[in-house]
Amino acid sequence: MHDKPRPLLTARQQQILDLVRQTIERTGAPPTRAEIAAELGFKSANAAEAHLQALARKGALELVGGTSRGIRLPAALLQDIHQARSARPQHQLTLALPGMAQLLLPLIGRVAAGSPILAQEHVDQVYTVAATLFAHRPDYLLKVRGMSMRDAGILDGDLLAVQKTSEAKNGQIVVARLGDEVTVKRFRRNRGRIELVPENPDFETLVVPAEGSSFEIEGWAVGLIRPAALR
């Protein structure tokens, strides 16, 4: 069986394909049309879309509707990316396009009872993240454990971008410390009492006792990174 010949691409098409591949290698996700346009100096995202459509017609990639990052690469290219990611040092991962403003965010794993959430022993690694991913600047990433926020699109293993704060408004998704546990829930003040509400009917609402409880707001969610594409 002979390998399928690679399509002949123009210099610009090859440049865009390389950008898509490099972005997936760095971030685990393809760029948006706007990011391609900004990186390559196009006047609008429509110009990037036209080149992507031409690449799709040549079979160099696949376009998926309904999402701003709906670009898929052939299996052979994805295998090359996977091998390159596996060879990368694991102490620091990059989630950014070159030239963008970047943030260095510690990833917090399990938090020991009673210790500050940003204590050095809780930091698993550091991510370099494009600041443009977030409307509000995060201070750290927290690895989500469990499925209590499933219906809000927050899944087990996701990286929640969190801005430090000790206050919260009704309806905000917060990182809260209740007793010895750090949890992600929706904050609700109901008739003078505080409730931490899950987004999954299989889980119960946590009611904060009025007295005698160790309760703190550690921060509120300002974004989400799904690491599945990084594997």
Image (tube, rainbow, N blue to C red):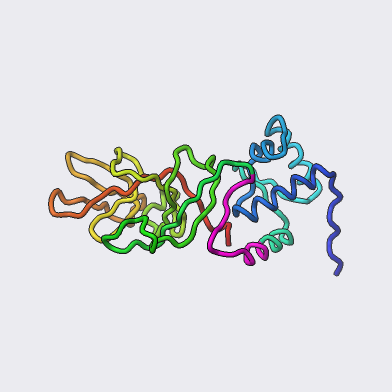
> For the point 36% across and 58% down, which residue is it?
119
> For the point 47% across and 48% down, which residue is it?
224
Image quadrant where one finds the N terminus: bottom right
Position of residue 71 measured from the top left corner of the image (x, y, whole percent): 67, 48
Q: Residue furthest top?
A: 43
Left/right of residue 41 with respect to residue 169 in the rendered view = right
| Residue 90 included in the magenta stretch of the image | yes
Position of residue 176 measured from the top left corner of the image (x, y, whole percent): 30, 51
Q: Is residue 66 among what the camera can see?
A: no
- Residue sitting nearer the eye, 215 or 146: 215
| Image: 79 above or below 224 | below
- Residue sitting nearer the eye, 92 or 153: 92
> For the point 51% across and 46% down, which residue is it?
103
Q: Residue furthest left?
A: 211
Q: Is residue 79 among what the camera can see?
A: yes
- Residue sitting nearer the eye, 87 or 47: 87
Badge count: 0
Left/right of residue 154 with respect to residue 11 in the rendered view = left
Image quadrant in which you'd find residue 4: bottom right
| Image: 23 above or below 170 | below
Position of residue 148 measured from the top left corner of the image (x, y, whole percent): 36, 55
Q: Residue furthest front?
A: 120
* Span highlighted in magenta in the image: 82-98
Image quadrant in which you'd find residue 45: top right
Image quadrant in which you'd find residue 94: bottom right
Position of residue 181 measured from the top left corner of the image (x, y, whole percent): 28, 59
| Residue 35 included in the magenta stretch of the image | no
Left/right of residue 50 with respect to residue 168 in the rendered view = right
Image quadrant where one finds the C terminus: bottom right
